[in-house]
Image (cartoon, helix red, strand yellow):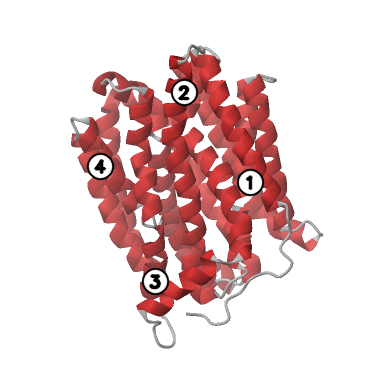
Amino acid sequence: MNDFYRLWIRLVPAYAAGYFLSYGLRSVNAVIAPELMRELNVSAAGLGLLTSAYLLAFGLFQLPLGLLLDRFGPRRVEAALLLVAAAGCALFGLGQSLESLAVARALIGLGVSACLMGSFKAFSQWFPVQRLPALTATIMVAGGLGALSASLPVAAALPLLGWRGVFFLCAGLLVLTAAMLMRVPDQPVHGPHATLSQQIRSLGDIYTSRQFWRFAPQGCLIVGGYMAIQGLWVVPWLMEVNGASRTTAAEILFMLGVAMLAGFIFVATCSTWLSRRGVPPMALLTAGMGLALLVELCLVMNLAPPALLWPLLGISFSLGNIAYSQLTASFPISISGRVNTALNLMVFIGAFGLQWGFGTAVEAFAASGLSRADAFRTTLGGLLGAQVLAFAWFLVPVRRPSALASAT
């Protein structure tokens, strides 16, 4: 066994376990939405706000998270935050009102905010840059498994545990994962620490970079839009637009997760091989985002069975996460935590606003006289128009990749 695989075994499983739970908790409300709406008597807009509290807290913490990851390292930061997520899960299981559940949901989002970015930071410290797309996809495989766990398995567990029991179980698993992370190797930070003002100044350099703004709108609207829909609105769409039962909708959500997982496995196992044969990761990213737009158009126009279209959307999203490794390569490794979290902030701003806004728009269109099915289609059509503009901007090449002059 060579050094790469020895290091892989020591690092990847613990970070993968964290992202498995993060993605499962992000998606679980899509399956328990009918129970939450019935028990709490909330509208689609209220459910969107409740569920997106996770995304809001997650997104708002991305900037300080990047500073923490670069300063203290991913192991300690992520382990500590997972304990916050465990507390949030326990509070969600005990919640009796929309307000208390929203606070709990926000704590969960805050607590798992480092699961993906922490792994990216750790991998950038320990592995060469040509390995990063495959390692990124490996963590996304764990996320895909988490999404699967939040579909049919959760639906099957509800009669036994109830939705509250599901969250109590997650609280225990989060504590266990935090303990696992404290056993992974830690990369010491060499050289003097940058001052807070220098760190903040480096954020300004990132946010004024043309290279960053090539990726940001697409991340916000396409990747964030997918997260908003997959995390809450797939099941209501299938029930309202396609007339599916809750069981059938959960099955299609499971198929979407399987397809997304297959895409992650493809990137993890084949991206390096394809790159050596003239198909760079950027080409895969472009193809994935273009496919997502075509699939959404087919959903709006009802051009194919939903059991085909939703899995195709999952495959397209699996390619979208290549953006993180491609953007990170344009900046020094010492600020990779800030670069990744800067992009992730844009993704989660989009996911929060679109998840809440999607439900609000559906209610508004329905109130204006449209059927619920047409209200869903009109809302997705409006989102698709904005996504097309973001994709067109992404296709404009950057002549000179940006890089900071100093690693602060």
Q: Amino acid at mark 1?
A: Ala
Q: Please name the residue shown 62% across and 23% down the image.
A: 300
**Label 1, label 3: how far apart the Cα atoms are:** 33 Å
Q: Earlier in the sequence, mark 4 or mark 3?
A: 3
Q: Which residue extends farthest front?
A: 368
**Label 1, label 2: how far apart the Cα atoms are:** 23 Å
- What residue does disc 1 label? 390
Task: Describe the element under mark 3 as helix, strand or loop.
Answer: loop
* Looking at the image, residue 297 lies above or below residue 27: above
Q: Earlier in the sequence, mark 4 or mark 1?
A: 4
Q: Amino acid at mark 4?
A: Ala
Q: Please name the residue shown 44% across and 22% down the image.
A: 364
Task: Describe the element under mark 4 as helix, strand or loop.
Answer: helix
- What residue does disc 2 label? 362
Q: Is residue 165 visible?
A: yes
Q: Amino acid at mark 3?
A: Gly
Q: Earlier in the sequence, mark 3 or mark 2?
A: 3
**Label 4, label 3: how far apart the Cα atoms are:** 26 Å
Q: Earlier in the sequence, mark 1 or mark 2?
A: 2
Q: Nearer the viewer, residue 185 or 264?
A: 264
Q: Nearer the viewer, residue 88 or 386?
A: 386
Disc 3 crowd, CA 10 A, few/some/many (<14, 14-19, 20+): many
Q: Are marks 4 and 3 in contact (CB under 8 Å)?
A: no
- What residue does disc 4 label? 104
Task: Describe the element under mark 2 as helix, strand or loop.
Answer: helix
- What residue does disc 3 label? 73
Disc 1 crowd, CA 10 A, few/some/many (<14, 14-19, 20+): many
